[in-house]
Each structure stands twice: as structure tokens, then as C-alpha cells.
Amino acid sequence: MRKTLICFCLMAPLALGAAELAGTWKYAAPPNPNAKGNRPPAETVYVIKVDGNRFTGTMLVNRGIADILNGAIDGTQITFERLDGNGRKTAFKGEIGGDQLTVSPANPPAAGQGQGGRGPQGPTVLKKASSETEYKLPPELAHKPLPEFKPIKPNGYALTPPMGWNSWNKFARAVDDRAVRGMADAIASSGMRDAGYIYVNIDDTWEGERDKDGNIQSNQKFPDMKALADYVHGKGLKLGIYSGPGPRTCAGFAASYNHEEQDAKTWAAWGIDYLKYDWCSANEVYHPEELKPAYQKMGLALRAARRPIIFSLCEYGWQEPGEWGPAAGGNLWRTTGDISDNWYSMSTIGFDSQIGREKHAGPGHWNDPDMLEIGNGQMTDTEYRTHMSLWSMLAAPLLAGNDIRSMTDSIKAILMNKEVIAIDQDKAGVQGLAVRKDGDCSIAGRGGQQTKIPCQEVWKKPLAQGVAVSLFNRGGDAAKMTVKWSEVGVTKKNPKVRDLWAHQDVTAPAELSVDVPSHGVVMVTVK
Ligand code: GLA
């Protein structure tokens, strides 16, 4: 009798907390009077399934689905991890008290970096909404289980990094049929096409509503996509388009969710040659672990459409797309958030955020540090030369993002430097990297915060024949920079050295010593 009583007393608080925790909990943020648009404020929702003193579940943060992992209940105290769409895990702790669940990050973020759905100062206080323990999408957003992710064979396209133009950086929502035709004309007449810029890519905001059979239609800015494709093809160019695995694109237009095969067929019928497929609202309908199969679903749909279409994945580098992008049918994948036309954005993306990704690049499958900003006006020509050199050293896609119709001669000379383009397009398809970083400098970010960076970097990119070497000066002052050929793997005496921006041969038997302007580059081949 006594034994039973002791056992009961120990179990009681644990069982009580566990029983209370199972179910659906909600926190509704108060309406934000400054919010734009008419979307209601996002709720924070937890749907929790309990098994003994362990639990798992689903959580909605700003409408995005996150997984609740490794939940543990100890009396009224809980701990768990949140797995977000970007593959990141965050530890949380909380307390169950009647119809209230109080949750806060186990390691609170620094001031100013609040969690979604959290009250202004304190932890999130959720109220029990129902006893439902399975998270279900609203019926209009439901989807069939995605097929298991199984590697598919390469499609054989993009054996060198894709080159062309994309509308987003310059036009954003203002792109229309006229602008695209104008750009195709200018790409053909300016020499850009002959320099290799072949793809004319329409980014977001071309999409209209679906017809009664679910076929995607273009909106009034693009009256006839097939006619536009014919026009672009007539210029010796190819046409690209944009969509995403979610219900809506980043700009809020219809995307391919639950219409993947149908959209791929429509694009093939229009004559589309390139697809950029952008995650955005997909985290409102897919769990983090569904990201890869969601991309593969479109990879397979493009195959089934039987037209050579380059497949460009855009999930901002969240789930290491280099590891699985090719197996999903992808030819390239974004590795970062959006670039902007300034030195901080461009240089930190190019120099710092691509480190370690070299192993993922090669013919048919490329890292994509985002489109070029060359010629958009907010960097100097010196900085744009660095942008062009760095992207070429990285074997990155070269997608111009400026208005080709009104390029200055100096911008033309940068974008159409054939000797630099040849480095990007080298058949070996090796992504270059820094072999030496010197000095301690710092760079001011958007919020004015200072980040430590090297002042100078020496890069190499092995080529099918020889090696490309770039001396980059990230610092605020001009600098003398030296590289010994032995540092970049050249053992031959008296190699042939050519300066790719000065367009001249250089005598440099064992090393090169040059003055490099602030934010500038000297780029050579050593053969
Ligand atoms: C995201 C992408 C951008 C662009 C926009 C369009 O932000 O990263 O490159 O495609 O969406 O809405």
C-alpha cells in the first residue's frame, strides 16, 4: 500500500503536465497599427503530441512551419528545439500552467533580435485553443505527401556557369514585355550576346491568375508569353521565367504549389529555357524536411516536360543546397540572401559567404551568389571590376542585372571583358578560393555595425590550362600586393603572365608585385 502511494506521488506532477501539454496552443499578436497591407497579424501556433514525458509537434512562426523536436517534460517545465525551414535549430524552455503555456528561448537573443510572435519584452504566452494534436493545413492549402527524395541523373545542361540577364535587380516589379524585348534587342546589338550573355530571365511579377483548368497565365504586363519567347529566340537568345514551390512568390503572385507538372508543361509550350524557383511562401505549406523533395518535384516535372530548361534553385543557402541540388535536378542554387548594389553587400557575399562551397561547384552544377549589380549605379567602376572578377573567380553564374539599353562605355567594358569572362566560363569548372588573407580591416554593415575582414586577399582558380590569380584589396587605402607563383601552385619558371584588366602581357618570372587601389583588383592568368 505504502509503496503504491510513493509511486503515485512521484508520478503525479509529471503526468499532470504531460496531459495538459498535448493539444493546440495559440498566441495572437496584437494588431500592428503600422502594418502595411490587409493581411491579419500572424499567430504563433504550437500543435503538440505527447508520448510519456517526451513530445514533438509543429509550430507556426510568422505563418512558416517549423518542427518541434526533442521535447522533454519535467513536471510543469518543458524544453524543446525548434527546427526552421533554414535548417537552424533553436533551443526553447517553457512552463505549463493551467490553460497557459509560457515559452522563451533557452539562450535569449541579443537585444533587438526578437523572436517571431513574442511579446515586446517578455516570453510568449500561449493559450490552449483545442485538444488537436495533429497539425493540418487548411483544406485549400493541403497537399499529397511528396515522393521520397531519390537522386536523379544530371540533365546535362549548364556545363559552364549560365550567363545572361535578369530583371529583378534593376526593374523589380516594373518589368514588362516591352522592357524584356528592349533588353533582348540591346543584348544582341551591344555585343553582350556574343560575349556569352544568352539567357534573358524574367524574375517575379509576371504571373497572373490560373484559368478554370488551373493553367497559369501571365498578367497584363505580359500579354503573350509564347510571342515573347519567339521574339527573344529570334534574337539568338533564350528566355527564363520565375516561380516557386509555395502557393505564392516572394512578391505575392501565384506560384507553382500543387501545379508543378502543369506549370512545367505550360512553360515548355511557351518556349521557356530557364526557371528560377524561389522558396518564399513554401514554408507556409511544407515542413523543413520537405524542402528538398519540393525542389525535386519541380526537377522531375521539368524532365517530364521534355524541353531543355535550366533549373535554378533559390532557397538562399538555407539547407546547404550544394549537397543535394544536383540530385534534385538543379543546375545552380542560390547560396545567400539577396544582393544589393553596394560594396558591403557585394563584397561580403563574394569574399566571405562562399567559403567552403567550392566542393559543390562543377560542370552542370554551380553555386549562385546572386545576380550582378554591375552598372546599377551605387558602386564605383573599381568596385564593379572587383564584382566581375570575384564572380568569375567563383565560377558564378553571370546574370547582368542592369539596364542593358543604356549602359555606359565603362560598364560595357566591365561586363564584356572577354578575358575575365573566359575565367568564369573555363571548362574545368573549378570554383576559386583565397590562398592568402592579410591584415585586419573592418567594414560597416547596414546598421553601421563593424565586421572584421581581411584587408587583402590573394585568390586562385585553377583553369583547364594554367591558373587565374586575383589580388583583391578590400581595405580603405591603396596597397602594394605581392604573390609568389609557388603560392598558387605554379612551379614552372618564367610562366606566361597576362593582366586581364590591362589587357597586356606582364613580365613576372617568379612573382607579381603590384599596387592595388582600395576596393580594387589586379587579375592575371599564369600559364
Ligand atoms: C527573392 C529572391 C530575389 C527575387 C525576389 C522576387 O527575394 O531572392 O532574387 O527573385 O524574391 O520577388
Image (cartoon, rainbow, N blue to C red):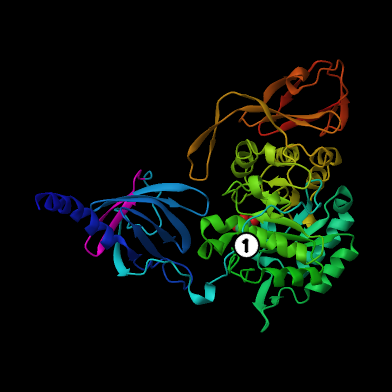
Ligand 1 positioned in quadrant: bottom right
In the rendering, at what x and y percent does residue 206 appear? Answer: 69, 69
Q: Main secondary structure of the magenta part?
A: strand
What residue is at 53 percent from the left and 76 percent from the top? 140
Q: How many marks?
A: 1
Please determine whether, in this image, residue 263 is positioned above or below residue 472: below
Taking the image as drawn, is residue 332 in sight?
Answer: yes
> For residue 427: magenta?
no
Quadrant of image for the C terminus: top right
Instruction: Please name whichever residue, 185 or 26, is drawn nearer the observer in this view of the structure.
Output: 26
> For residue 94: magenta?
yes
Taking the image as drawn, is residue 377 in sight?
Answer: no
What residue is at 65 percent from the left and 72 percent from the top? 259
Residue 518, image quadrant: top right
In the rendering, at what x and y percent does residue 441 appear? Answer: 56, 28
Please determine whether, in this image, residue 474 is positioned above or below residue 195: above
In the rendering, at what x and y percent does residue 466 appear? Answer: 84, 28
Q: Residue furthest bottom?
A: 212
Q: Is residue 109 left or right of residue 174?
A: left
Q: Identity of the amino acid at label 1?
A: Pro
Residue 204, image quadrant: bottom right
- The residue to which callout 1 is attached is 147
Instruction: Please name whichever residue, 157 or 119, is drawn nearer the observer in this view of the structure.
Output: 157
Q: Is residue 64 left or right of residue 9?
A: right
> Within 10 Å of the Cα at label 1, are there few (<14), some (14-19), or many (20+) other Cα atoms?
few
Q: Is mark 1 within 8 Å of ligand 1?
A: no
Q: Is residue 190 left or right of residue 122?
A: right
Instruction: Please name whichever residue, 198 or 285, is drawn nearer the observer in this view of the structure.
Output: 285
Q: Which residues are magenta?
A: 93-108
In the rendering, at what x and y percent does residue 477 appear? Answer: 63, 28
Disc 1, SS = loop
